[in-house]
Amino acid sequence: MNVKKLYSKYKDVVFYLFFGVCTTVVNIAAYWLAAHPLHLGTMPSTVIAWVLAVAFAYITNRKWVFESSASGKKEILAEMGSFFACRLATGGVDWLCMLVLVDFIGLNDMVIKFAANVIVIVLNYAASKLVIFRSKRNTP
């Protein structure tokens, strides 16, 4: 299989991993800023980080990863609703990890935040690929 065919076949995975890393950076940086310099606490900081990361992820996933063909206000709002609903579900995984492992057990918040993000990236890819952006354009 040549490089062009490999790229075509795995383009969305490569882009998803790249933007997943970028989204993780947004999430962790926003969490750190809110939790440490601003002293907002684990859960408020986690929620703020989630909102910023999900907004970033929607824009990048829609445009570059899955190249959404949704158009018109109704179609885009439906897609956005699905995206945020799925992210809310996986956000629960992040919140639960932070609550139990950081607030209750007392583990290092930055280590747990990173580990939770790895789990969430995998779950989000599956949701995006199978549910939200499944009407992706046909590729040759």
Image: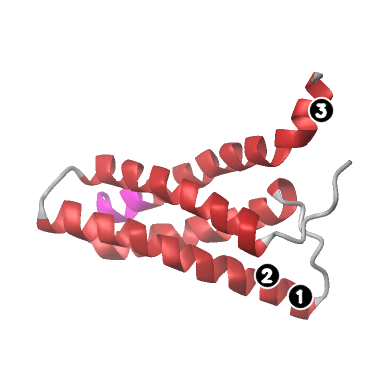
Q: CA distance from mark 3 to mark 1?
A: 31 Å
- The structure residue drawn at horizontal position 52% and vertical position 66%, both measured from the top left corner, is 86
The magenta segment: 31-39
Q: Is residue 40 visible?
A: no
Where is mark 2, residue-wise?
79
Where is mark 3, residue-wise? Answer: 5
Q: Is any part of residue 95 visible from this angle? A: yes
Residue in front for this viewpoint, 135 or 24 = 135
* Circle 1: element type: helix
Q: Is-magenta flag for residue 129?
A: no
Q: Residue at x 34, y 48 (%)?
A: 116
Q: Position of residue 62 (x, y in %)?
A: 70, 56
Report the mark closest to the observer, 3 or 1.
3
Question: What's the distance in space between the residues labelled 1 and 2, CA to CA?
Answer: 6 Å
Q: Quadrant of residue 93?
A: bottom left
Residue 23 location, x and y as percent? 51, 47
Mark closer to the chain start, 3 or 2: 3
Q: Which mark is residue 38?
A: none
- Residue to which mark 1 is pinned: 75
In the image, residue 98 lies at what x, y percent?
A: 25, 55
Task: Say which residue appears at 26% left-offset and 45% top-offset.
Answer: 112
Q: Is residue 11 left or right of residue 102?
A: right
| Residue 75 placement: quadrant | bottom right
Looking at the image, is mark 3 or mark 2 nearer the viewer? 3
Query: Could you tell me the amino acid type at mark 3?
Result: Lys
Quarter of the image where the N terminus is located:
top right
Residue type at mark 2 is Glu
Is there CB contact under 8 Å for labels 3 and 2? no
Mark 3 crowd level (few <14, some 14–19, many ≥20, 10 Å Cα): few
Q: Is residue 109 above or below residue 41?
A: above
- Kind of residue indicated by mark 1: Glu
Identify which residue, 42 or 113, lies in the foreground: 113
